[in-house]
Image (tube, rainbow, N blue to C red):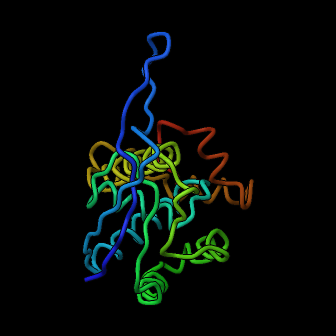
Amino acid sequence: MIDVSYSYQEESFATPGGLVIRMPKSEKIYSGCVQISDDTIIETVEDYSSILRHTEERIPFSKFLLTKLNNDQMFKTYPRGMFIEDKEYVKALVRNNIPGDVADKYWDINRQLGVSYVPTSDFNAIIADRINGVITKVNSLESVIDEINTVPEKTLPFVPEALRKNYEDEYGEDADLYLNRDFSGTFRVY
């Protein structure tokens, strides 16, 4: 088990001119601690890998980890930061589980940042909301992809091999582009 200390502010709302605005209740920052398993970190790495695969968002892993842990473990409405004592263990766990297809993008985004600490002044609910929006978008995209792959009767047939060969001869590497242009809605082109 890994001890994760976190800080947060309680949530309140302001109503200037009848518009409801989410904001921290006060400047007071509270703290707490949860224990998480290695599997939780590994699942978070898998979710982060999906974000890297399906979006161009440049979200640092430490902020993604805080948001994901807050969603799944801490349930605080205005997260401010976290600290993991055994930083090297978590870094090793992340390094060993980041998939090869997104490893370069992971390192490009995270090389200068610590894996396990988010400074209190550097994180707020707006960033958490943005990250949650990206998580939701990627989860919906993945569910559509899963549905396409698991329900073949709802999907289009693959392009016939003879037609694909004709387009490859005529257009070369751009064959899929032209197949999609000419046969979208008729054939599935990959």
Q: Quadrant of the N terminus?
A: bottom left
Q: Residue extending furthest top?
A: 17
Whole-percent x and y of residue 160? 49, 54
Q: Nearer the viewer, residue 167 or 176?
A: 176
Q: Residue at x 44, y 53 (%)?
A: 158
Whole-percent x and y of residue 56? 62, 54
The picture quadrant where one finds residue 164 is bottom right
In the image, residue 182 above or below residue 64:
above
Tally the numbered discs: 0
Q: Residue at x 59, y 44 (%)?
A: 180
Q: Nearer the viewer, residue 120 or 125?
A: 120
In the image, residue 25 above or below residue 96:
above
Q: Nearer the viewer, residue 82 or 112?
A: 82
In the image, residue 72 above or below residue 62:
above
Whole-percent x and y of residue 74? 28, 58
The answer to whether residue 157 shows anywhere in this view is no
Whole-percent x and y of residue 37? 25, 78
Q: Residue at x 25, y 74 (%)?
A: 35
The answer to whether residue 163 shows anywhere in this view is yes
Q: Residue at x 45, y 26 (%)?
A: 21
